[in-house]
Image: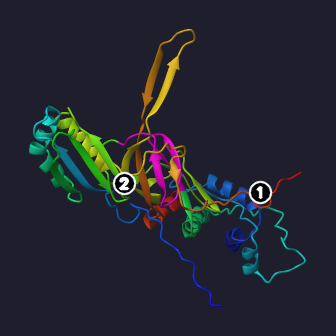
Amino acid sequence: MLLVRAIQRSLLRPQVIETCSSFKTVSSITPRFSLPIRSRTIATTPHLRISSAPPKTSAPTSPPPKTPPTVPSDPALAAHEPLALLTALKVQPSKYIIVKIQGFSFLITPGDKVVLPFLLKDVRVGDTLRLTHATTIGSRDYTMNGNPYIDERLFECRATFLEETAEPLRKKEKKKRRTRRIKTVKSKHRYSVLRIKELIINDVPPAVAAAAGGST
Amino acid sequence: MPISALQAVSKAQNGVGAFILQCKRMEFNFCDWAGSSKGMRSFLKHSLSQFAKENPQIEIIVAPRPNQTPIIRGTYINGREKVIPVDGLEIQQILQKAQLLRNSSGAKLKRITRPVISLNESVRGIFSPFHGKKHVI
């Protein structure tokens, strides 16, 4: 138990490539309601190191533990690991989400404007849309990948339908050799524009988490 | 010397908090005599009131413009104007043009190369070979 907590705490320090693999093995025994989050190695920025301990000039990057931390044998503990990662992801200041809209993927953050290469049907300008098909939610240090999509209940991503525009008229001239006839083809693609309002990661409801923990 | 704060202006992000329709005024000009205004005159008689009711944010002006083609002139919050001539069109087509003006933001039509336009810095930061997974030789 203490070892597991120490592992988690160690992730918040700038180190340790080996812990990444440990979480990969943990995720293989995650509960049904799985949270496929993995943590990335955190960049060795000076301010992070200073906050953990008084600076030691002898070893600026302290040597990481050589053996990977053991996988916790207790399955109930294993259920808590991805939840802890989800909380860590939620707490990070900036996040991104990769959503799919009619098959097109967009990597977006709150406040972005997305110009869709098509017109959305059955929507009026000013409507709020909820984007539900997300393949990835990430932050600086954590990534959550869906399989193929992330569970809808875990996040809320809303967008406002801003406008319907078009590109400027394009003309393409088509002409064959040794012929005087010129054919002109006109193109003016229409676009819908969305503004991403918010990206909220929800807490896993305790009933679901308990059920998931019990099922392993 | 006293230190003064940096002047910062908030960036407009319509739709994040509240949404404000960009089209603020639409002016319908028609001619009483000319045949090209026929569709426009019947549109003004039958369809315009419904359109105005659905869009209370838009100021609608109806003014005769004798001996000129009938037009719809949309004015937007960014100060630009969009004019669409509707000579010879029928009621449904004129309504479509009015919807087009309503749904537009007034910005000049621009070719879009990248779909996402963002003011935020990148979440994961710019690549550095000295941070992250170390390359093992």
Marks 2 and 1, Cα distance to the nearest angstrom? 51 Å
**Residue shown at 82%/67% (left/top)?**
A64
Q: Is residue A98 visible?
A: no
Q: Residue furthest front?
A: B67
SS of the residue at dot 1?
Answer: loop
Q: Residue furthest bottom?
A: B1
- The residue wearing badge 1 is B133
- Where residue B71 appears, x then y in whole percent? 23, 43
Q: Amino acid at mark 1?
A: Lys
Indicate whether residue A139 is drawn in magenta.
no
Q: Quadrant of residue B98?
A: top left
- Where residue B11 appears, x then y in whole percent? 48, 66
Q: Nearer the viewer, residue A200 or B45?
A: B45
Q: Quadrant of residue B12?
A: bottom left
* Chain letter belonging to callout 1: B
Indicate whether residue A110 is drawn in magenta.
yes
Q: Amino acid at mark 2?
A: Arg
> Are the residues under badges 2 and 1 in a single subunit?
yes
**Residue shown at 38%/58% (left/top)?**
B78
| A97 to the left or right of B61 | right
N-terminal-most mark, 2 or 1: 2
| A28 to the left or right of B100 | right
SS of the residue at dot 2?
Answer: loop
**Residue shown at 77%/64% (left/top)?**
A16
- The residue wearing badge 2 is B80
The span picked out in magenta is: A97-120
- Where residue A168 appears, x then y in whole percent? 44, 39
